[in-house]
Each structure stands twice: as C-alpha cells, then as structure tokens.
Amino acid sequence: MPTYAVRAPLARWLRDEAKRAHDDLGAYRLLDVGCGQKPYEPFFAPFVASYIGVDPVDNPHAELKGTVEDLPVEDGTFDVVLCSQVLEHCDDPARAISELHRATAPGGRLLLSTHGVQVYHPSPVDFWRWTHAGLEKVVRENGDWTSVRVSPASGTTACVAMLVNMYIDLAARRAHVGALAKPIVAGLNTLAEAIDGRSSRLRNPGPGTLHANFHVVAEKAA
Ligand SMILES: C[S@@+](CC[C@H](N)C(=O)[O-])C[C@H]1O[C@@H](n2cnc3c(N)ncnc32)[C@H](O)[C@@H]1O
C-alpha cells in the first residue's frame, strides 16, 4: 500500500486508543466526525455504548449531517470524539477544534489525526498541512484541554518512501502494469520502517524531519 506510512500506524493507534478509552472511561459514547465509511468502527464496537457518525455530505453511514465547524450535537455529549483525516479538509481548523472541544464530555477525550506531508487530495476540498508544533498550537489554543499530546505516525524515511511509492504506483498503473509496483512498494515500506527504527532523529519531530501524519490525544477536565 503506497500510503502505508499513514494507514498502518493510524489503524494501530486507533485500535490501542479504543481499548485505552474503555479502560479509563468504561463503555463510552463516541462521535465520529467526518466519518466517511466509518473504517475504524470495528475497533471501537466492542467498547462503546453508542457510535454516532456525522458527515457533511449525503452519507448512508452517517447518522447526522453537518460539518466539524458546526456540529449538530449538544454540548459535552460524547466521551470520545474521533476526527480522523478531516482537519485538512475543513474551512476553519480553529473553529473545528473549538467545536470538537464543545462536543467532548467533561473527563472525555478527542482522538484526532491529520496530515503532515501529503499529496493534494480533495474531499471535497483539501486546504491544510501541519507541523507537529502548528497542530499542537491550534489544538491548545482552541479548547480548555488538560493535556494535548501530538505524536508523529511514522518517521522521516517512511514519509519519503510514501511519496516515492505513490509515484511508482501511479506510473505502474498508467503503464497498465500495476501489479509490478506492489513488491517494490512493499519492499520500500519495510526498508523505510527498518531505517527509521534505528534512528530516533528520523522518528521524532525536529529540524529536518518529515512526517506523513500526526496523531493527537487531547483530554478535557472532568
Ligand atoms: C479523507 S475522508 C476521512 C474519512 C474517515 N474519517 C477516515 O479516516 O477514513 C474525509 C471525510 O471528511 C469529510 N469532510 C470534509 N469536509 C468536512 C467538514 N468541513 N466537516 C466535517 N467533515 C468533513 C468528508 O465528507 C469525508 O467523509
């Protein structure tokens, strides 16, 4: 998969966070904002009291229609608010974070992911990219969170490999030999993970690093 550096760590992270939230909060009410096809619902299903999706487009998977900047929910009604790969698509990230904070119940948490480096991918638009510092700033400044933790999904080599893989995959598909790209993509992903695994300077955000995606956990006071 060319976007392995985004998708594999995101799935691992959400699987862990789904269980951790249950350990901390018991059966929880979850709001999935910009839910798309709810790809991560199976991770949360064993742990939730309810799972509500919201999306701005006509979406058969969503129970509610609305944007992240104007959520159609009461204040503080969800113990876990999930917002995965949506922030880059919204008009106003600051207002979006403020709304995500409003929807989160006292003692609850926001689980958010968004891109560091990525190709342009409208859904229906694509406005923003983040550094770890910029993402932490916009989350901290738009909600009275007790803690905000921003972590890179994967390291610098994985990010470079992702971009190279995307173009190898595209070129192979255009040449009608898409299957030939698969072992090259898989090999580069494995090599990149191994290189990042040997160097904390490639894994952790700092001068000169690149990260494909970031994961955020923000907690609200009880
Ligand atoms: C890249 S998809 C991510 C879907 C899903 N959350 C995931 O992680 O696979 C982006 C989703 O955000 C939704 N979206 C776009 N703009 C939005 C906005 N302003 N507010 C809420 N959702 C939005 C799109 O309709 C789409 O479902």
Image: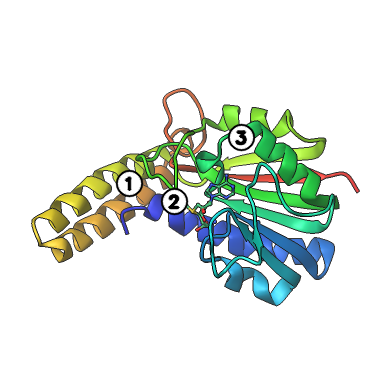
| Residue topped by disc 3 | 93
Q: Which of marks 1 and 3 precedes in the sequence? A: 3
Q: Tell me the mark number nearer the camera, choosing from 3 and 1.
A: 3
- In the structure shown, which secondary structural element does the residue marked by tag 3 occupy? helix
Within the image, what quadrant is residue 82 found in? bottom right
Residue found farthest to the bottom: 46
Q: Is residue 158 above or below residue 35?
A: above
Q: Tell me the mark number nearer the camera, choosing from 2 and 3.
A: 3
Q: Which of marks 3 and 2 precedes in the sequence? A: 2
Q: CA distance from mark 3 to mark 1?
A: 25 Å
Q: Quadrant of the N terminus?
A: bottom left
Q: Is residue 159 left or right of residue 63?
A: left
Q: Is residue 157 left or right of residue 62?
A: left
Labels 2 and 1 touching (C-beta < 8 A): yes
Q: What residue is at 65 percent from the left and 30 percent from the top?
A: 138
Q: CA distance from mark 2 to mark 1?
A: 9 Å
Q: Position of residue 140 (x, y in %)?
A: 72, 31
